[in-house]
Amino acid sequence: MFGLMGDANLFMVDHYVRNCGATFVPVSYEGSAVLMALAYSHVSGKMGVATVTHGPALTNCVTALTEGARGHIPMVLLAGDTPVMTPQNLQNIDQRELVKVTGAGFEQMRSAGTAAHDVAHAFFRARVEKRPIVLNMPADFMWQEAVHETKTFKAFKAPAYVPEGDDLDEAVGMIASARRPIILAGGGAVEARDKLVQLADRLEAPLATTLKAKGLFNDHPFNMDIFGTLSTPAAYEVIAKSDCLVCFGTSLHHFTTDRGALMKGKRIVQVNDTVTEVSKNFHADAALVADAGLTAGNIVYWLDEAEIPASGFTRELDMAALTAHPPARATTAKDGFVNFVHALDRLEEILPQNRILATDGGRFMTEVWCRITVPDPKSFLVTANFGSIGLGLQEALGAGFAAPNRPVVLFTGDGGFMMGGINEFNTAVRMKQDLVVIVCNDSAYGAEHIQFLDRSMDPGLAMFDWPSFADVATALGGKGVTVRSADELEAAIVEIENRTTPLLIELRLDPNDVPRMRI
């Protein structure tokens, strides 16, 4: 359980640790507890749990709850509330209305006698609704006694139905007649990997993923990697030439479609088991509300029944060229700075292969997404569902508890680290986490910096003279290393290999030489 204690949850947390022998991870800021629980849920597949007290503690969780709701990540937040009999409490607020605006669900603990039932129902809702659920616990109940009876409500997860009828016939017809089809998988299709590969092989079609499914087809010979604005120039050309996209488990966000540009001149088939995600961002030519794996298998069946020949599209493709991002040269950076792309390419070579990768928000992140690989989608944490910065280190910590035998690597910007990372770096030290933090320090809020420059304006208001992040990391109990050149990068690589405590590597970047965001 991740959390921060206060008046309305301290006895519960104390009992959880001392009487139940469980683990409590004390955070520095309430929103961090929610982010850690979200990452724990994503990486482990188990239910992430957090707890905070009432009023300002819960308001401090609004951004994190929104991040989780928009990312469709299940977790439970046990939130205290002010006593029912003292409405004049300074920290009193309508917590139900607050939670509603985030998109998370709200569950009210009704009494001490119903506590076990209410907790179990909150867990049930989180699983089936695939979002955070806040269980509201009035402080009065914490000191009451009740007979405990264990409650567990099974979360039914049977796959959605396989469609039939005109919509299916139309979708299969589009796929069967395609000469250059591409199979696209999103985060909602991760569990259907093998069935999607079977369909791609049957069609002789290349495979691609959205950002959230990054790494899903790593070992497949016709894996195009990320589809959309994050594609290589060569892959973008291949996408432009294709005539049919068969999309599973994705809402077709405008970054995926390049605001619709990549959809032009193609038949689009969309399969999603969540009806609200169908046509949310793009209206497909054929849409099926169904399970990804069952539907892919069904499409293969009908292709075989009709004896449809393979498209042969993969025979046209040079996969090495399709997936190669342009290299950088270390000598292109000014004195006192390291070339960002060169640093990423070197880090990709030496970072532990079994890593979990977390990224914060900022203009640096799209280049990280393109150049730093992950073993699979569950080993990849994207904190971009709400467009916020300052969420990455907290999720990195949650991932570390979900997979305690694996190293976690976080890429964060200077602004994001100051906003949220610096709060919890010492938590990583206290909890002895195997964590490598790469701070991409361009001494600026990069997205704003480039907008000023594009309008021939002075970017000074978007620039900051931060303290040494390496020194800060050391002061917080970890180890910090500053990188200002290619040679210092090699020295930092030695520190990664010999790390014994949370390590922070500060990449000093020229704000005028950071690649633009690929969005």
Image (cartoon, rainbow, N blue to C red):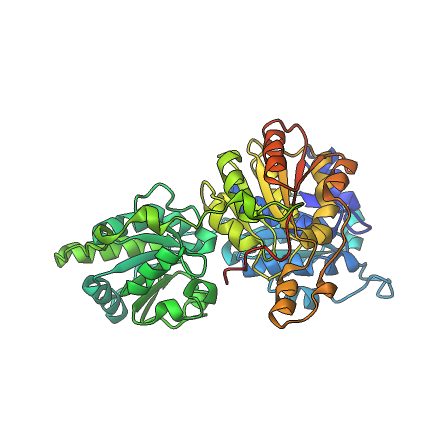
Q: Left of 192 or right of it: where is 357?
A: right
Q: Nearer the viewer, residue 373 or 125?
A: 373
Q: Residue 234 sits in which quadrant?
A: bottom left
Residue displayed at 72% across by 59% down: 463
Q: Position of residue 251 (x, y in %)?
A: 44, 64
Q: Residue furthest left?
A: 307
Residue 458 sits above or below residue 231 on the image: below
Residue displayed at 71% across by 51% down: 420
Residue displayed at 31% across by 54% down: 294
Q: Nearer the viewer, residue 414 or 416?
A: 414
Q: Nearer the viewer, residue 234 or 6?
A: 234
Residue displayed at 35% across by 47% down: 193
Q: Is residue 128 visible?
A: yes
Q: Is residue 144 visible?
A: no
Q: Position of residue 116 (x, y in %)?
A: 64, 48
Q: Position of residue 359 (x, y in %)?
A: 58, 49
Residue 60 sits above or below residue 427 on the image: below
